[in-house]
Each structure stands twice: as C-alpha cells, then as structure tokens.
Image (cartoon, rainbow, N blue to C red):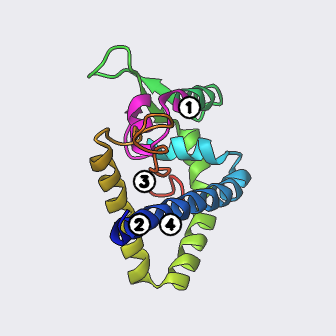
C-alpha cells in the first residue's frame, strides 16, 4: 500500500470514527431534549421526519439511514400513543403515510426552547459560518457515501459484504425541531 493510499484510508477511518462519536453525542443530547416532552430520541426522530409532510415508513427509513423495520416499530408506537396517524397513500395502496397528529405536533413543539438554546450555544462555540459549513460538509459526505456504495441512502454495504464495514450514514436531516 502506498503512502497516499494509507493516508486516504486513514482519512476514511477518522471520518467514520468522528461520525460514530457524533452519532452517540447527538443521540445522548436528543434523549435529554426529548425526555421532558415524554418522547425518546427515536420517537422524536421519526416524528420529526414527518413534520413537513406525511411519508411512508420506507421513505422515513431512507431519509434517516435506518431500517424500515425500526421505523415501522416506532411508527406503530407513535400511532398507539396518539402522536401520529396513518393516512391513505394515493401513490401506493398498501404503504400508508405516517403523519403527526395535533398532539404529536404540540409534543414536538415542547422541545423547541431547549433545541433553540442548544443550537444557539453550538453556533456560538463553532461560529455561525463554520456551523453552516459543517452542515454542508456532512450533507456532501452523505451524498458521496451513497454514490460510492452505489446503493442509495441508508443501504450501504453491510458487514460481511466484502465491500465495507457498514453504512456510515447518520441519523438523517432535520425538519425544524425534528431532531438535533
């Protein structure tokens, strides 16, 4: 292996480890922010994905980079708790759309003040320009991972595939206070 190849491989490892650490940090802060509203980070994540528009479970999973089965389990719990509802999907008879209920929207809105405070503190720590650039770089990295794995969002090579060590896509994009 050449020095350049080793350097590029080290960059990938550093990036992956950084993203894994950030994922853990975001999950921990999400739990802390969501708890006073009676949500878990996972519930908030799925509710946040459908705040702008109803989506099928498979669409939420793709956007978030998590499995359809995980989203389905959480969606069913949200519906049972009255925080979300299934709606008919004009594009697909069997794949219902998940949408937040009024209670779901009110519950997510309870997170807004703490979410805004965290965003303000993080922007002050990084600087607004660097914060915006960080978001752009992470979005670009996600698109690049989709391109090089040739599999699309959340479906990168898995363990044992011979082509990688698992998907490195993160929890997904946020919509308002969908998640940190």
Count neighbours of disc 2 (C-alpha within 10 A) and say few if under 14, some if 14 to 19, many if 20 or more. few
Of the numbered discs 3 and 1, the one sitting upstream in the chain is 1
Mark in front: 2 vs 3: 2
Q: Which residue is mark 1?
A: 70
Of pointers 2 and 1, the one earlier in the residue sequence: 2
Sort mark 3 into few (<14), some (14-19) or many (20+) by Cα contacts within 10 Å. Answer: some
**Which mark, by number, is residue 6?**
2
Please name the residue that numbered disc 3 is placed on.
173
Question: Gap between marks 4 and 1, in whole Å?
Answer: 28 Å
Q: CA distance from mark 3 to mark 4?
A: 22 Å
The reply to whether callout 4 and callout 1 are in contact (CB within 8 Å) is no
Is 57 a magenta residue? Answer: yes
Relative to residue 153, is residue 15 drawn left or right?
A: right
How many numbered marks, from 0 up? 4
**At numbered mark 2, what does the secondary structure look like: helix, strand or loop?**
helix
Look at discs 4 and 2 and give the one toward the viewer: 2
* CB within 8 Å, label 3 to label 4: no
Quadrant the N terminus occupies: bottom left
Is 176 left or right of 2, judged from the image as shown? right
**Extreme residue in the top direction:** 94
Q: Residue at x 46, y 50 (%)?
A: 168
Q: Is residue 5 above or below residue 38?
A: below
Residue 148 at x, y percent in the picture: 29, 49
Q: CA distance from mark 2 to mark 1?
A: 36 Å
**Mark 3 and 1 residues: CB-CB less than 8 Å, in contact?**
no
Between the C-alphas of marks 2 and 3, the distance is: 31 Å
The tag earlier along the polypeptide, 3 or 4, is 4
Q: Which residues are magenta?
A: 51-71
Q: Quadrant of residue 142?
A: bottom left
> Image quadrant of residue 157?
top left
Give whichever of 67, 8 is nearer the camera: 8
């Amino acid at each position: 292996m050449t020095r350049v190849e080793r350097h590029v491989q080290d960059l990938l490892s550093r990036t992956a480890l950084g993203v894994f650490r950030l994922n853990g940090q975001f999950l921990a802060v999400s739990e802390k922010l969501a708890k006073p509203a009676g949500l878990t980070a996972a519930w908030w994540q799925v509710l946040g994905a459908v705040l702008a528009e109803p989506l099928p479970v498979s669409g939420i999973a793709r956007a978030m980079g998590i499995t359809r089965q995980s989203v389905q389990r959480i969606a069913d719990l949200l519906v049972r708790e009255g925080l979300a509802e299934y709606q008919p999907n004009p594009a697909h008879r069997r794949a219902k759309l998940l949408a937040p209920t009024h209670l779901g929207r009110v519950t997510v809105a309870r997170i807004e003040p703490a979410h805004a405070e965290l965003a303000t503190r993080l922007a002050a720590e990084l600087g607004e320009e660097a914060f915006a650039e960080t978001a752009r770089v992470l979005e670009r990295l996600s698109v690049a991972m989709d391109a090089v794995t040739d599999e699309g969002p959340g479906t990168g090579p898995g363990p044992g595939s011979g082509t990688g060590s698992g998907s490195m896509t993160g929890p997904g994009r946020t919509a308002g206070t969908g998640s940190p």
